[in-house]
Structure formats: structure tokens, C-alpha cells
């Protein structure tokens, strides 16, 4: 029985990668803003349509740095509990306190209607997540932020290649961050980037990923090390050449899934483009398991798939407000997020997932729910 995991990295032809990394041996330059990194950044600037990008070693440190650059020593940040641990940890690593806002059940992003009730005199920023690449309610969130003098930093880890109203989805807010982790549709093995709004913030953001150093004799900020190295940049450069076909293949995989899933009662997939404004990237394949209608719970389906060698994932369970490390925070009232955490399952999706594999996955889903 062949195992199917929730994702698998896209790997280019090895000769393409070898050709690019051979330059590392010619130049003896491995990291610290090397030539491949600069070339990768330039290509990304053209692709995303902005010059305001800082490359980082991963998405987590991109978020930590973006939040640090706001300059608050303490305070509260409104965020979503339905996300990967990284989002919340990046807030607390900056000595700020996460305040969890519920999500909307339509696309599982932060519920803009619930934000204002959470704002206090200690609120410093809003950190929403375009979860699975589903766009947040951007206009509503930004109107609330503007009214209260707050900045918005989007965790856009899942959004590479997405556009919203014709603009990169990562070009909204004070800043947005990408993850280029191996498990993402576009990757540089590990990697990330900050896309920022105000050009004058560039020098500080760049310094923050290099120990806060501005030049040989000026250490201006308390920063860490979040530099992307040349091997990462080489992988990013090569993979960027393939991004259109990567997205197209995933679109076809998603359509194949949807045709099959639409025949199974109680399994609902999400429509990411609710208002016709999003060019989606097909990064994830979350489905909602409606227990009563389907005839089994999300966890029963997860276990049944596992027995068949199909490793779907419960992204994002547990909620961050329920994680052991955040029990020092006051309890939060997030019923929609709780429902999502117990009923959403991410099905396998990756480049190279064969139609027969999708058929196999869907027939297990149908069988567990008693449909076939
Ligand atoms: N914000 C959000 C909203 C995020 O989702 C993430 C990361 C971040 C911020 C932080 O960005 P980074 O600092 O990571 O750049 C994975 C990823 O490691 C993580 O990047 C991602 N989100 C998260 C949603 O998923 P795990 O713990 O599920 O990974 P793991 O090792 O269980 O891998 C999942 C599956 O992928 C495996 O079952 C098999 C397959 N796989 C994985 C790797 C690493 C491969 O086939 N090959 C591989 O090399 O977190």
C-alpha cells in the first residue's frame, strides 16, 4: 500500500538546481546577502510587484521581525486562534499578549465583526491570517485598524502566487509575511519574506534579520539572525521558474477532488473566491466534515484514512488558545474557531498527486460516510 502524505515538496529537475548552485563553488559565497539571494529577491520583486521585500530564513522569523519593527515593548495583539503555532509564538516572542478573535465560518479567517469588541487601550496591532490562502476581510479589518490607530500585519504564509483585486495578496497592511517552507506550494527549502508598505522601514527590517547591524560600526537595533543562505535562494530561483505550472496542476487536482467530493453528503469544501476578487493558489485542500449529515466525525475519518496509508492532517487543531503553553492567558470565547478545529480536515494535495490517488482517497471518504 503506497502511503500518501498531506503534502510533498515540489522538486525541480536536479540538473536545473545543480546549474544554479555550481555558481556557489565559483564564488565561495554562501550566505549574508549573497549574489543568488539578491537575484532571487529581484525576481520576487518583479513577480510580486513591489521593491519593498526583505528575504528571511523562514516565515516564522519574518513574522517575528515584522512585529518587532512596530517597536512596542508590551501590549496586546488581536489575532486568530485558528492557525499554525508560529503566528501566536511570533507575538509572544515580542513580549506582546495575544488576544484571540473568533473566525467566520465562511472561509475560516478572523471575523472582522468581532474585532472591535476586543480592542482596549493596550491594543497595539492586529495579526490576521489568510488561512489556507483564503483572503481575510481586508477592507473591514483595515478600516477598524485605521479608526483605532493600529497597524495590521498579515500572516500571509499560505498565499504565495495569490492576487486580490489584481494586487499581490501579500501587499496589504503595514506588512505581510510569506513562508517558503518545503511544505508550501512555492519553497526555497526553508525560507520566507516580509513584504512591507513604508519604504522608510526597509533599512530597519533588513537590519533586524542581521543582528540589528546597519553597517560595520553601527549596531542600531536588537536583532537576531534570520538570513537566507545561497542554497535556499538557489532553490527559490529555480522553483520560481515553475510557479505557473505548479499552480495550474494544483488547480486541476482540486477540480478532480471537487467533482468526487460533491457526491459525498456531509463533506463540504471551501470556496476561496467568495467575492470574485481572488486569484487562488490551491495551496491546501481543507474540507468540513459535517458529522450528522456525513455519518462520521472528522476524527473518525482521519483515523480511517490513516489505516489506509492516507495521512490527512488536522490543520489547525488544537486551537492556539487551547495549547498547553497558552493556558496562562484568560479563556477565550471562540465558538466558530472551536467548531472548525474539530471538523476541518486537510486532504492531501501536492504536485504529482495522481488522479488514481485522488480517486482512492475519495472512495475511502465515501465508504466511511456510508455513501459507497
Ligand atoms: N504562519 C503560518 C500560518 C504557517 O502555516 C506557518 C508554517 C508559518 C507561519 C511559519 O512558516 P515557516 O517558519 O515554517 O516558514 C508544516 C510546516 O513545517 C510549516 O511550515 C507549515 N506552516 C505548517 C502548516 O505545516 P508540520 O509540523 O505539519 O510539518 P511536517 O514535518 O509534519 O510535514 C507535513 C508533511 O509534509 C509530512 O507528513 C510529509 C511532508 N513532507 C514534509 C517535509 C518537511 C515531505 O514530504 N518532505 C519534507 O521535506 O508543519
Image: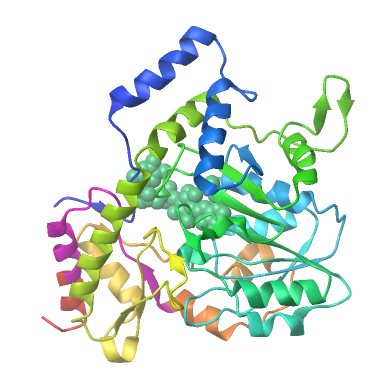
* Numbered-mark total: 0
Residue 360, x across and y down, in percent: 14, 63
Q: Is 352 one of the magenta-colored residues?
A: yes
Say left or right for 101 vs 242.
right
Please report the bounds of the magenta region as a residue range.
Answer: 343-362
Residue beneath the point at 29% across and 56% down: 250
Quadrant of residue 227 in the image?
top right
Q: Is residue 63 magenta?
A: no
Residue drawn at (39%, 49%) of the image = 185
On the question of residue 371 being in view, the answer is yes
Q: Is residue 14 above or below residue 328?
A: above
Q: Is residue 36 left or right of residue 350?
A: right
Residue 72 coordinates in the image, percent (x, y): 86, 56
Would residue 302 be found to the left or right of residue 72 on screen?
left
Determine the residue positioned at 61% across, 46% down.
50
The quadrant holding residue 284 is bottom left
- Between 214 and 49, the one lying in front of the other is 49
**14 sits left or right of 73 in the view:** left
Amino acid at each position: 500500500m503506497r502511503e500518501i502524505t498531506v503534502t510533498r515538496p515540489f522538486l525541480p529537475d536536479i540538473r536545473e538546481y545543480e546549474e544554479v548552485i555550481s555558481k556557489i563553488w565559483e564564488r565561495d559565497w554562501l550566505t549574508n546577502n549573497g549574489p543568488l539571494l539578491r537575484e532571487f529577491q529581484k525576481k520576487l520583486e518583479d513577480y510580486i510587484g513591489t521593491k519593498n521585500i526583505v528575504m528571511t530564513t523562514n516565515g516564522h522569523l519574518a513574522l517575528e521581525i515584522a512585529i518587532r519593527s512596530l517597536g512596542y515593548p508590551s501590549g496586546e495583539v488581536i489575532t486568530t486562534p485558528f492557525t499554525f503555532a508560529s503566528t501566536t509564538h511570533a507575538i509572544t516572542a515580542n513580549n506582546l499578549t495575544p488576544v484571540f478573535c473568533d473566525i467566520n465560518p465562511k472561509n475560516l479567517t478572523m471575523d472582522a465583526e468581532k474585532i472591535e469588541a476586543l480592542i482596549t487601550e493596550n491594543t497595539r496591532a492586529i495579526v490576521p491570517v489568510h488561512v489556507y490562502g483564503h483572503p481575510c476581510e481586508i477592507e473591514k479589518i483595515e478600516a477598524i485598524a485605521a479608526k483605532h490607530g493600529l497597524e495590521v500585519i498579515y500572516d500571509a504564509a499560505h498565499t504565495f502566487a495569490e492576487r486580490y483585486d489584481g494586487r499581490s495578496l501579500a501587499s496589504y497592511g503595514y506588512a505581510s509575511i510569506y513562508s517558503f517552507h518545503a511544505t508550501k506550494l512555492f519553497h526555497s527549502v526553508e525560507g520566507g519574506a516580509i513584504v512591507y508598505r513604508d519604504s522608510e522601514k526597509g533599512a530597519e527590517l533588513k537590519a533586524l534579520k542581521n543582528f540589528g547591524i546597519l553597517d560595520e560600526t553601527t549596531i542600531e537595533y536588537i536583532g537576531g539572525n534570520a538570513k537566507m543562505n545561497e542554497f535556499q535562494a538557489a532553490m527559490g530561483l529555480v522553483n520560481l521558474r515553475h510557479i505557473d505550472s505548479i499552480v495550474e496542476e494544483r488547480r486541476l487536482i482540486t477540480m478532480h477532488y471537487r467533482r468526487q467530493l460533491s457526491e459525498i453528503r456531509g463533506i463540504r469544501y471551501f470556496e476561496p473566491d467568495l467575492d470574485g476578487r481572488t486569484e487562488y493558489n490551491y495551496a491546501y485542500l481543507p474540507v468540513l466534515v459535517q458529522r450528522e449529515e456525513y455519518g462520521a466525525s472528522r476524527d473518525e475519518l482521519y483515523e480511517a484514512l490513516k489505516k489506509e496509508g492516507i495521512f490527512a492532517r488536522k490543520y489547525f487543531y488544537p486551537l492556539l488558545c487551547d495549547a498547553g503553553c497558552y493556558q496562562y492567558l484568560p479563556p477565550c470565547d471562540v465558538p466558530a474557531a472551536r467548531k472548525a478545529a474539530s471538523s476541518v480536515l486537510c486532504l492531501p494535495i501536492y504536485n504529482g498527486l495522481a488522479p488514481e490517488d485522488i480517486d482512492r482517497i475519495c472512495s475511502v471518504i465515501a465508504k466511511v460516510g456510508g455513501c459507497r
